[in-house]
């Protein structure tokens, strides 16, 4: 665990997150344990700074961007809390969609609607860029936007959902998989 100084008076312990899902969206689903929702959960994103820590560990946010977001969050706590609530809703929708598919069922319309609303936000502003391998897409990221880490998660879920089923099935998880992390048993999303 790392320690991040939020301001001159406060310090928080930065949790370490598991990145074992094979897809960013599945790693995001791993930020809570004890799923399905009717069981006791082990929430790992209990604050906006923890969401920023996750995004930094996922390499979605640089250290300097994280500092900017945390400073902004100190003075805009309601906005930061709203983004955290939105992140939890996205995570639950992702879990619902892929848990249903893993069980051979159809996802709920509300989970798909939520993902689609987030995907509309996430698809704004792609640019074609020259890469060493040819071309690639670069996604616009509004500097200092409280929700900048949510767009890549939504795009990842859309990519997994649209993968051919024989490929997507290889990335679906078994919800019976229990791991021990930090001394706590929890359900995990894991690449099969």
Image: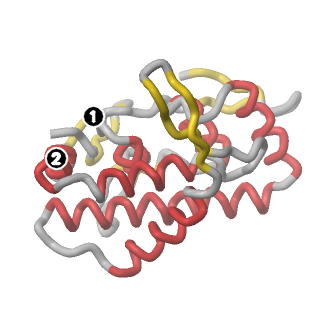
State the residue in front, 113 or 126.
Answer: 126
In the image, residue 165 above or below residue 21: below
Q: Where's residue 44, x and y in %?
A: 49, 45
Q: Which mark is residue 180?
A: 1
In 3D space, how far apart are the residues under numbered discs 1 and 2 (Cα atoms)?
28 Å
Which label lies toward us, 1 or 2?
2
State the residue in front, 18 or 132.
Answer: 132
Mark 2 burial class by Cα count in 10 Å: few <14, some 14-19, many 20+: few
Q: Where's residue 15, x and y in %?
A: 53, 32
* Mark closest to the chain's N terminus, 1 or 2: 2
Q: Which residue, given by chain and number where applicable, does mark 2 sit on?
A: 167
Q: Residue furthest bottom?
A: 109
- Residue 128 lies in what quarter of the image? top right
Q: Left or right: where does residue 130 sit relative to residue 66?
A: left
Q: Secondary structure at mark 1?
A: strand
Mark 1 burial class by Cα count in 10 Å: few <14, some 14-19, many 20+: few
At x 27%, y 73%, the residue is 107
At x 37%, y 60%, the residue is 94
Q: Where's residue 46, x and y in %?
A: 57, 50
- Residue 24 lies in what quarter of the image? top left
């Amino acid at each position: 665990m790392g320690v991040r100084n939020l301001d001159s008076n406060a310090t928080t312990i930065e949790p370490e997150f598991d990145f074992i899902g094979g897809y960013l969206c599945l790693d995001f689903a791993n930020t809570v344990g004890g799923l399905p929702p009717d069981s006791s959960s082990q929430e790992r994103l209990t604050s906006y700074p923890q969401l920023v820590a996750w995004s930094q560990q996922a390499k979605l946010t640089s250290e300097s961007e994280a500092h900017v977001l945390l400073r902004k969050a100190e003075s805009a706590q309601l906005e930061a809390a709203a983004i955290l609530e939105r992140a939890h809703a996205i995570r639950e929708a992702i879990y619902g969609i892929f848990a249903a598919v893993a069980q051979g069922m159809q996802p709920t319309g509300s989970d798909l609607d939520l993902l689609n609303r987030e995907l509309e936000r996430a698809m704004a502003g792609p640019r074609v860029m020259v890469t060493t391998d040819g071309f690639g897409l670069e996604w616009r990221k509004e500097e200092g936007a409280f929700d900048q880490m949510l767009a890549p998660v939504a795009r990842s879920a859309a990519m997994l959902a649209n993968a051919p089923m024989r490929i997507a099935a290889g990335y679906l998880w078994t919800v019976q998989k229990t791991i021990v992390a930090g001394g706590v048993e929890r359900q995990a999303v894991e690449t099969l």
